[in-house]
Amino acid sequence: MKKRTAILLLLTISMHLYGQLPNGSIAPDFNVLDINGQPRHLYQMLEEGKIVLLEISATWCPPCWSYHNSQALQYFYNLHGPTGDNRARVLFIEGDPATNTDCLYGTAGCNDFSPGNWVSGTTYPYIDNSAIADSFAVGYYPTIFAICPNKKVYNVGQLDAAGLWEKAKTCPVRSGQDNAGIFDFDAGTSLYELCDTLTTTPSFTLVNLGSNALTNATLQLEWNNTLLETRTWNGYLPTYGEAAIYFNTQALAGDGMLKTTITSIDNGATDADFSNNVQNTNFVPAAVFTEQEVLLKIRTDNYGAETYWELRDEVGNVLDHGGNENVGPNGGGMLTNAPPGYGAYGNNVLIKDTLHLPAGGCYSLHFVDYFGDGMCCEFNNGFYKLYNIDNPAIPILSGGEFGAYDDRGWGVMGAATATIAPSDHFFVELYPNPAQDQVQVLFELPAPATISVNLLDLLGHTTYALPAAQQPEGSVRLEIPLSDLPDGLYFLQLKVDNQVFIRKVIHTRV
């Protein structure tokens, strides 16, 4: 986690700045001279279609010097500035009104502190103008902003060159006469691991990137190449004009890809750039646990107080929580040191917590990092891991490398599923077990019934399935092939009408 020293924190608190501009705000313009006397007009660069990165910094700031020496902005400038693909510009802003220009050069005339020559080895412009920092209402140094050609500004954080470009290239950039694009796509969920059925309402922002006005567009939503909805938009959008598009509520099941496409614009006009006309969002099957008690392990990094988590059911009710309550479920990405609060974890400690689930079904974990850089890996290897309660050695679900938030979906087999035991009325036998090439499933049906079988691995993925079929009363013998599967533990899920029975299968070739 990128953090501040105690000195910097005090300085940041005492800085007489205002609340930072919210992401998506219109950037304030400036037209100033850099330290070499060259004019730098922000809106002119934006109107030329350039993405502008601003680093607002201070020469006395240790984290600023550290980030500067990473050369992230210089590498970015080499790749995307005038000598690269010419799609972006970089400006360094000295934001402290108390320092003079000598501090940028690290010379004896510096009236404050400077660890060295900031200008040496860099080729992008430097501007000594604290009014710019004030206009952007920075709350800490360094602050890195990406400003899109539509004049919207976003705080992107202290990323490397590749990470900066990933953020920058999401900007809408004008191109051609007729051109529309999909931006700010929202699948309607923060969960991309599907447990059972997920109901969601996808939406996005339709942006006109052409010089001609956009007056109509046809939009499609597909799930696994099956058309779910076609929507027609009519209106009037000038260049960089925006319209919010909402699809109908959809129910997604299994795994697959949700695809959104702008199929046509302006009554069949040729789109100048089709690359931003398609948005693909992938969903995968959720991990499945076999018991209603799940073991959660958390290893904090050097800043344990920044962590908070919640256990939620499938409708969003909070069943359990832990960590710093002053961070809370919406406190991610604050980019300052976390305030102390009840439940805050220590640094570099291991926490174990047993999650008691009321029933089988779908659940999720919501993790929050106050600073916005997850639990791993720059400031020690923090993590979270979930285990079946009877096997605390092999995690079923794990994570820790994320930004401000991480949402993970998973399932638990139903109460009858996980706990039902053999009885005089229904007995399921597996033979042999452990098994090598195949396992036989033996049981007696007291009456005709519909049966189906799924063999699941530890992550809940189906490795073999027998579809539902009607069986007569009497003895049933099924053979489940194992020869193509890796050695390990599996779960046989036998469904008899509305009852589900789970049995462990151990596969070994030895």
Image: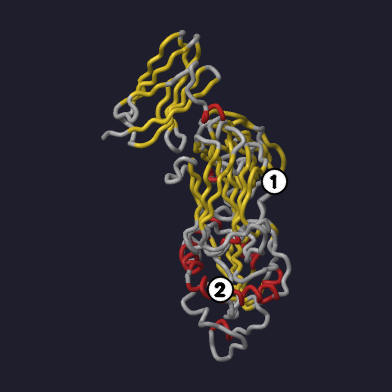
Which three-letter amino acid code belongs to the residue tagged 1?
Answer: Leu
Judge the density around disc 2: few (<14), some (14-19), many (≥20) Cα neighbours within 10 Å.
many
Question: Is residue 437 placed above or below 270 in the rendered structure?
Answer: above
Residue 324 shown left or right of residue 507 in the figure: right
Looking at the image, which residue is at 50% across and 16% down? 425
In which quadrant of the rendered image does the C terminus lie?
top left
**In 3D space, how far apart are the residues under numbered discs 1 and 2 (Cα atoms)?**
41 Å
Q: Which residue is mark 1?
A: 237
Q: How many labels, in total?
A: 2
Looking at the image, which residue is at 67% across and 54% down? 328
Q: Secondary structure at mark 2?
A: helix
- Residue at the far bottom in the pictured view: 108
Q: Any mark on residue 64, and which?
A: 2
Where residue 439 sits, quadrant-wise, is top left
In which quadrant of the rendered image does the N terminus lie?
bottom right
Pick whichever, 482 or 429, lies toward us: 429
Comes first in the chain, label 1 or label 2: 2
Question: Is residue 51 placed above or below 271 in the rendered structure?
Answer: below
Where residue 18 sits, quadrant-wise, is bottom right
Q: Are marks 1 and 2 in contact (CB under 8 Å)?
A: no
Residue 193: % across, % down: 53, 39
Pick whichever, 323 or 30, lies toward us: 323
